[in-house]
Image: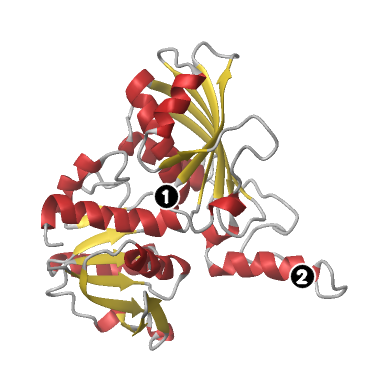
Amino acid sequence: MGYKVVVAGATGNVGREMLNILAEREFPVDEIVALASRKSLGTEVSFGDKTLTTKDLDTFDFSGWDIALFAVGSDATKTYAPKAAAAGCVVIDNSSLYRYDPEIPLIVPEVNPDAIEMYKNKNIIANPNCSTAQMVVALKPLHDRAKIKRVVVSTYQSVSGAGKEGIDELWDQTKGMYVPGQEVAPSKFTKQIAFNVIPHIDVFMDSGDTKEEWKMVAETKKIVDPAIKVTATCVRVPVFVGHSESINIEFEDFLDEDEAREILRTAPGILVVDKRENGGYVTPVECVGDFATFISRIRQDVTVENGLNLWCVSDNLRKGAALNAVQIAELLGRRVLKKG
């Protein structure tokens, strides 16, 4: 016996990935429905070898459905997630709306699976920010061994993190560079993204941090350990898919780079590719479509007492969003619902 599953926002980048991953991982589905806003109503989307026609999110009755994967943004989630939850359907939400609610679990299954039990508070589970998700997968096994004091992270985030509009803007600006008179002015981003980098993701806060940077701090504390100090600089780069991060970690206890490498090799969700030679590391192009979080460039930082550097790459549409949501659904099924 399987589950009755809803995918809300099924026509977007993340919603389509959710459908793909549910099929790829053979999630036990008895019935599935794809929901979209009225402007996308009737659009066809793929689920394995099936074609689904989207139905109207606004009028959908969630009664009798088991799990709803939401990829519709905070505004729509605020309207529809409580309706689904009240109808007995467990919501796994990809927006930022519920991430910082102390009564709602913020889950990365490889990191804090026991927090899943908190879903009973509101029948809602939050999916973390894309940049946080891949980082905490790398941090947790190291934290268990040597206890992390401080993390300094710089991100190199692809335009797909800004949705279809971000992808289109990079593509159009790149083409426009080669055709005189067809240059494309910034619209989705604050400056030209083609052949450029922009140290600005989300809005600026009074502290000078952007909200994306604040999210990494708050979410790492909630998921891993509130005692960890985190400082982040988040940068948008002209890459279509795949987020990269340069992570500097300071531990309470010494951790040798070789031991760290072995810990990460055996940790769930991680693939270590770390050869000190040309090409002996992973870049965003190579991670696209993969389930893993890739770790490379593991090395001692001798400028602090117990320091380590590493390079972390993952498909942001997968581990950073859709994959993590499906993994939460799998965890929910194994631990709580127990149908499949």
Q: Position of residue 228 (x, y in %)?
A: 39, 26
Between the residue at mark 2 and the residue at mark 1, the CA separation in whole angstroms equals 30 Å
Q: Is residue 169 above or below residue 218?
A: below
Q: Which residue is mark 2?
A: 175
**What residue sits 63% from the left and 60% below the top?**
189
Quadrant of the rendering where the C terminus is positioned: bottom left
Quadrant of the rendering where the N terminus is positioned: bottom left
41 and 320: which is toward the camera: 320
130 with respect to 110 (left or right): right
Q: Which residue is mark 1?
A: 129
Q: Position of residue 153 (x, y in %)?
A: 54, 34
User: In the image, which is nearer the foreground, mark 2 or mark 1?
Assistant: 2
243 with respect to 178 (left or right): left
Q: Position of residue 4 (x, y in %)?
A: 19, 72
Q: Is residue 73 above or below residue 134?
A: below
Q: Determine which quarter of the picture holds residue 145.
A: top left
Q: Position of residue 136 (x, y in %)?
A: 40, 38
